[in-house]
Image (cartoon, coloured by chain):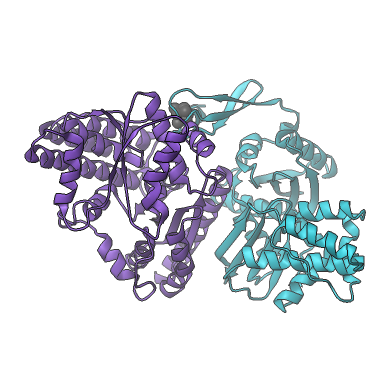
Chain colours: A cyan, B purple
């Protein structure tokens, strides 16, 4: 079997997928990053290698997410792309003709507008916590319900209560208030979903023309309560693709396929990367008052990448070395 | 009297030149850095915008180097900047940094007002000397801007990563060190040669993006995470809606220098979207967006500091401009919490979007 590897390294989760040449997802792995992107990627690669049949050939590898640059040098990626492009590309494959993508992950939310298969607009929200997966997780824990049940329970609501969802702090105190007033759990959960959707549409989706087909993806799309709240607010059907939680990785793999088609050769270092010894370190440069914190990654003792310098003094040095070798 | 002033990009070069010409003792604060920002954040009000915090940091650092007098620009409402000089002065006093303050308000009627204020700083110098000093400073501003424009052109095409940055800083040093008009002319020639000497790769497709918005966050690279450099390295040719020399000409010299792009044109282009002054550069921002769209740019990025009112007004108008002229516009808001990773993601995604659009358009036109 031949195919493409896609890796999405975010601050909360790290996802890996293997796409066959036809663009079908053969394997998907979802891991918690837990502040250790390198170890997590290595663990993921190992697991993926074990799951794939022997003799599988990786024709290209792509990376995305906030850890894309680090992971890119780690695995020798053919495509290093931002999350927005990766998500759009993946959505287009799984839901042809999509015009709007709603994306809510653990830490950030975004909206991507496509027309004729091309991204024409996007917005992203990383500052405010409301509307993100972490907040839903927290509330589920506080109410002592499994996050997996959250959506199901919300669906049983008869008349969702209105929760003030301007920000997480308000939402939480308002929920507690409504609980004390004696509102039922399903009504409160459904109300919370609606509040988060309102918040998302007002802050992230503000001013954007939301046209069907609409795709809802990211970890939070697992919550059927949220999907239903979107449908209610938008008065449009909302599709949750089957691989909604690994769309970034799917997109990265597709972008790798494109990149390799252009260059004809993959830079992927192979699954053995999982056993390599990587070390990251950082130092403060004293070359000027910027005092940049420069991050350095070494593989088996050789520095393979540096970044964080504002002037390029350290990162440029590496790219030169790369050319020589 | 040891005079200092806040940083705003390369402003220090012409200002220092002018003051040195008048034999005023000048202390240039260290370039704005993390340390500067930390000082400003610590002592400034939380909801003041980033320029105030960085100014404060600059002053504190200059004080450590022995400065005792501040020259600061003033302004007029509705933007808060007008009273920043006074507030900064009061804060400095509170933390035991007593410094003398000289505010240069933009002259109301004509340039003679500016000269009168300059005389305050320089005491016994003759009028003629003051005028010559202003001229000399202005010529440096022009030279610096020229280098910067060249750097914008070259960076996306450089064959070796970092070559443009090195050449640019060399060129700036040459201009900065020139002590007279004759030396400056010489330095300009040399600087041109250095910039022209950067090896370029050919045939690289280049997207053109205009950067517009609030003047401080546009001009001070520390405040915008070196946005223009990032864009250049990502293969984008950049233009900026305000250059130092243009701003000085518009606001301090009353458009004395002709044949220079003027904020008046930008304001004129802002109608029918925004027909009156909203403070700061709000009107210019809207007008520049229109002008750049007409000039065939691929995309526009608006930059402003968090809580900047005139730019918020402009931001709410820009989507209309974008759809009328069919040009994508991205807004970036800067404050001390802005992370570089998020910025990078937005920039990359925006450039992807523009490159795709350009590709499909060119395919259609072919
Ligand atoms: S890496 Fe460059 S910009 Fe950063 S502190 Fe060192 S010399 Fe200064």
Work out whether residue B14 can be spotted: yes
**Foreground: A68 or B6?**
B6
Work out whether residue B204 can be spotted: no
How many numbered marks are there?
0
Left or right of B233: which side holds B17? Answer: left
The residue under the point 79% across, 53% down is A26
Rendering coords of residue B186 (x, y %): 14, 33
**Foreground: B68 or A266?**
B68
Location of the C terminus of chain B by quadrant is bottom left
Q: In which quarter of the image is residue A190?
A: bottom right
**Foreground: A284 or B5?**
B5
Left or right of B267: which side holds B346? Answer: right
The residue under the point 71% across, 34% down is A38
**Foreground: A122 or B39?**
B39
Rendering coords of residue A61 (x, y %): 66, 45
Above or below residue A179? Residue A80 is above
Rendering coords of residue B253 (x, y %): 19, 52
Looking at this view, name the residue that lies furthest to the top: A301
Rendering coords of residue B95 (x, y %): 47, 32
Q: In which quarter of the image is residue A75?
A: top right
Left or right of B28: which side holds A46? Answer: right
Location of the N terminus of chain B by quadrant is top left
Left or right of B192: which side holds A50? Answer: right
Q: In which quarter of the image is residue A14?
A: top right
Looking at this view, name the residue that lies furthest to the bottom: A235
The residue under the point 28% across, 69% down is B268
């Amino acid at each position: 079997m031949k195919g493409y590897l896609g890796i999405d390294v975010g601050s909360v989760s790290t996802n890996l997928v293997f796409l066959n040449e036809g663009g079908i997802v053969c394997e998907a792995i979802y891991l918690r990053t837990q502040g250790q992107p390198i170890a997590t990627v290595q663990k993921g690669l190992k697991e993926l290698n074990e799951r794939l049949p022997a003799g599988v050939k990786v024709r290209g590898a792509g990376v995305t997410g906030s850890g894309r640059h680090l992971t890119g040098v780690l695995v020798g990626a053919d495509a290093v792309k931002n999350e927005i492009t990766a998500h759009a590309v993946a959505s287009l494959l799984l839901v042809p003709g999509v015009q709007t993508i709603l994306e809510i992950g653990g830490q950030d939310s975004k909206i991507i507008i496509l027309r004729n298969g091309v991204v024409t607009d996007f917005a992203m929200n990383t500052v405010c916590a409301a509307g993100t997966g972490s907040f839903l997780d927290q509330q589920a824990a506080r109410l002592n319900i499994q996050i997996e049940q959250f959506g199901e329970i919300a669906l049983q609501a008869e008349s969702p209560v209105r929760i003030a969802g301007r920000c997480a702090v308000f939402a939480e105190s308002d929920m507690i208030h409504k609980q004390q007033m004696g509102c039922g759990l399903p009504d409160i959960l459904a109300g919370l979903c609606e509040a988060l959707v309102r918040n998302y549409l007002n802050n992230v989706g503000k001013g954007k023309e939301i046209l069907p087909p609409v795709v809802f993806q990211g970890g939070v799309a697992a919550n059927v309560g949220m999907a239903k709240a979107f449908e209610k607010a938008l008065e449009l059907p909302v599709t949750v693709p089957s691989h909604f939680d690994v769309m970034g990785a799917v997109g990265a793999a597709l972008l790798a396929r494109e990149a390799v088609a252009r260059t004809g050769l993959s830079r992927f270092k192979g699954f053995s990367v999982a056993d390599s010894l990587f070390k990251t370190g950082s130092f403060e440069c004293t070359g000027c008052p910027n005092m940049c914190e420069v991050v350095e990654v070494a593989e088996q003792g050789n520095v393979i990448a540096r970044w964080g310098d504002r002037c390029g003094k350290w990162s440029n040095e590496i790219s030169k070395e790369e050319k020589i070798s | 009297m040891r005079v200092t002033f806040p940083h705003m990009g390369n402003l220090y070069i012409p200002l220092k030149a002018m003051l040195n010409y008048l034999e005023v003792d000048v202390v240039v604060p260290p370039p704005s850095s993390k340390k500067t920002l930390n000082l400003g954040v610590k002592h400034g009000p939380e909801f003041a915008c980033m320029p105030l915090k960085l100014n404060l940091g600059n002053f504190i650092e200059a004080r450590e180097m022995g400065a005792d007098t501040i020259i600061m620009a003033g302004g007029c409402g509705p933007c808060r900047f007008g009273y920043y000089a006074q507030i900064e002065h009061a804060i400095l006093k509170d933390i035991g940094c007593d410094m003398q303050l000289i505010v240069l308000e933009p002259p109301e009627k004509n340039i003679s007002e500016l000269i009168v204020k300059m005389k305050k700083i320089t005491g016994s110098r003759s009028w003629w000397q003051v005028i010559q000093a202003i001229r000399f400073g202005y010529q440096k501003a022009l030279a610096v801007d020229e280098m910067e424009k060249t750097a914008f052109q070259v960076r996306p095409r450089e064959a070796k990563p970092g070559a443009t940055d090195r050449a640019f800083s060399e060129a700036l040093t040459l201009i900065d060190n020139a002590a007279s008009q004759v030396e400056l002319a010489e330095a300009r020639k040399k600087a041109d040669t250095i910039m022209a000497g950067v090896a370029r790769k050919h045939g690289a497709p280049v997207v053109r993006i205009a950067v517009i918005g609030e003047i401080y966050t546009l001009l001070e690279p520390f405040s915008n995470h070196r946005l223009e450099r990032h864009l250049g390295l990502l293969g984008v040719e950049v233009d900026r809606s305000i250059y130092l020399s243009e701003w000085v000409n518009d606001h301090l010299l009353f458009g004395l220098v002709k044949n220079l792009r003027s904020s008046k044109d930008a304001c004129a282009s802002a109608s029918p979207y925004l027909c009156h002054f909203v403070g700061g550069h709000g009107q210019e921002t809207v007008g520049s967006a229109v002008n750049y769209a007409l000039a065939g740019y691929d995309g526009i990025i608006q930059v402003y500091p968090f809580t900047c009112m005139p730019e918020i007004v402009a931001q709410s108008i820009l989507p209309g401009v974008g759809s009328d002229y069919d040009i994508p516009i991205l807004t970036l808001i800067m404050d001390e919490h802005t992370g570089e990773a998020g910025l990078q993601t937005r920039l990359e995604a925006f450039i992807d979007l523009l490159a795709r659009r350009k590709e499909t358009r060119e395919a259609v036109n072919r």
